[in-house]
Image: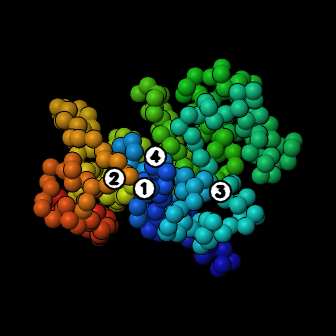
Amino acid sequence: MQQASKTQDLPLFSLLDVEKSFPVDGGRRQLKALDGIRLILRPGESVALVGESGSGKSTLVRVMLGLEAATNGRVLAGATELSALDASQRRRFARDVAYIYQDARGSLNPRATVAALLAEPVRLHRLRDEREIPGRVDELLDQVGLPRATRLRYPSELSGGQVRRVAVARALACEPRVIVADESVAGLDVSVQAQLLNLLRDLQRENGLALLFVTHDLGVASYLCEQVAVMYLGRIVEMGPTREILQSPRHPYTQALMQAFPRFGAPLAASLQGEIPSAADLPSGCRFRTRCLHVRDDCSRIDPAQTLLDGRRHVACLHPLAA
């Protein structure tokens, strides 16, 4: 019993100094998509990965899910190296970690009804007797706010919001401990987006799920997740409690993202200056210095390490902003 309790207390994921590089120009150069990532996801936590396109968010998720092997560093699922899981452990991992794709419609078999799509993971993981599966499908539809008549429809017959709800129901079907969602509300109109965010937040809290949510939208991060990790060019530059970071960003990149975010009653500030550099040709020193309004001489010489500020916040900056 004590051993089971210790297992429950373990982080679900631990990424320890993870790097991921891809060869470019025929192997003459390396594109460093991830560089020194340290991230812990514990049971019941909600963490948002925030950053511009090209910051490495999706690559980090693929490494966490074992779809890409890390070039260096360690990726742990519980206490075990992800690459060392045996067949039985991999089956358990596939059940414990559910992934909601950005292209929800493209992730669903167009020739299968909603009932078949939701029944498939239940059968695969042998979670119910065959006679109980129709009832389980109805339960899942109820959970995501879809009428039970939806079970007879095909993905092509559903609206964008309905398809996303089916994708969420399919993720819940395997009774996971973690849901990983990649830009799962992108491209939807504001009212549908709000409904889905409410759904995800309620399901996460009611079921005690851990949630890793990938987004470029700080508004979504602030509403949905208790923790936020801000990524820039393959590195987490600021990480900590969402409310504290959004109220008082300490990294200039986080501040720039905040200023570019629309708010009621305030004019829209200019977006970040310049283009994000190539991960195959990183600037010397601090990788954000070419776009930073607070750059100093030593920023071109020293690559800042992630340090702990305020007791709970990690920042990779030589000259953090004042609190």
Secondary element at image label 4: strand
Q: Is residue 42 above or below residue 5?
A: above
Residue type beneath disc 2: Asp
The residue under label 3 is 96
The residue under label 1 is 29
Residue type beneath disc 3: Asp
Secondary element at image label 2: loop
How far, Cα to Cα, is label 1 from label 2?
A: 9 Å
Q: Are marks 1 and 2 in contact (CB under 8 Å)?
A: yes
Q: Residue at left 66%, top 40%? A: 170
How far, Cα to Cα, is label 4 from label 2?
A: 25 Å
Q: Residues within 10 Å of mark 1 (few under 14, many from 20)?
A: few
The residue under label 4 is 214
Q: Nearer the viewer, residue 181 or 203?
A: 181
| Number of the front mark, 4 or 2 | 2
Image quarter where the N terminus lies is bottom right
In primary-sequence order, the first of circles 4 and 2 is 4
In primary-sequence order, the first of circles 1 and 4 is 1
| Number of the front mark, 1 or 4 | 1
Image quarter where the C terminus lies is bottom left
Q: Is residue 27 above or below residue 113?
A: below
Q: Nearer the viewer, residue 159 or 306?
A: 306
Q: Position of residue 236 (x, y in %)?
A: 36, 58
